[in-house]
Image (cartoon, helix red, strand yellow):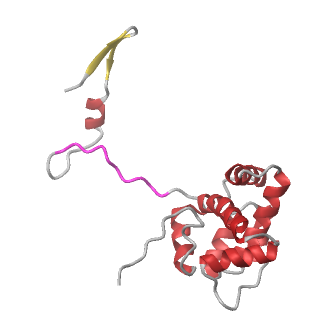
Amino acid sequence: MTAHTFSKAGLRSSGRSAARANNPPNEKGNHSAMLPLPEQDTSRADMTFLQMVERVRYEGAYPTRQRAEDVIHAVLAALGRQLTGDERVDLAARLPAEVSSDLTGQETGRQPLTGWGFVKDLAARAGGTPATARWDAGAVLAVIGHLAGPGLLDRILTQLPPGYALLFGRAELIQAA
């Protein structure tokens, strides 16, 4: 049955019958409108460098574009010291060209750093405090997580030691022993 509503413009249909016509019943006879969504192709940068700078500037509440750019370069260089293999290459391909070399131009660290170690290393290299480094990492990595997409971000977080999920704006789930 199609539901109708009246408005000043006249009679309107809710479109239920059209949805049923395009959606066959499942094994229980229900007409479910839930269809799986295809995974989006995020294999290339969908953000320009200027858009990235503005997004990081907004996320981090930085007063100038230059400050946001400096933070982007520092955080990507630090991340480049932690990531290896296909994840590093795939992430670099999704970044704007102006910053992909910040990620790939770094030698990977001898010892992988936890999320907290990453923040402390970033603070030491940038000459700031751990609190400001944590803020900077969160502002940049939230944008990087968006550019990476859920599949690549899952792979990145699997490769990195514990503590990075929160930096990317995700909950860190710990498996019970």
The range drawn in magenta is 30-39
Tell me what residue is drawn at x 53 percent, y 79 percent.
162
Residue 34 falls within the magenta-colored stretch: yes
What is the x, y in percent for residue 132?
Answer: 72, 64
* Quarter of the image that includes the N terminus: top left
Above or below 138: residue 84: below
Query: Extreme right residue here?
Result: 66
In the image, residue 104 sits, relative to residue 100, either above or below, namely: below
Q: Is residue 81 magenta?
A: no
Q: Left or right: where does residue 142 sit relative to residue 101? A: left
Residue 70 appears at what percent x and percent y?
82, 62
Nearer the observer, 35 or 67: 67
Q: Is residue 136 above or below residue 5?
A: below
From the image, which quarter does the C terminus lie in? bottom left
Q: Residue at x 69, y 91 (%)?
A: 110
Nearer to me, 130 or 105: 130
Which quadrant of the view contains residue 148? bottom right
Placement of 9 over or under 54, stated as above or below: above
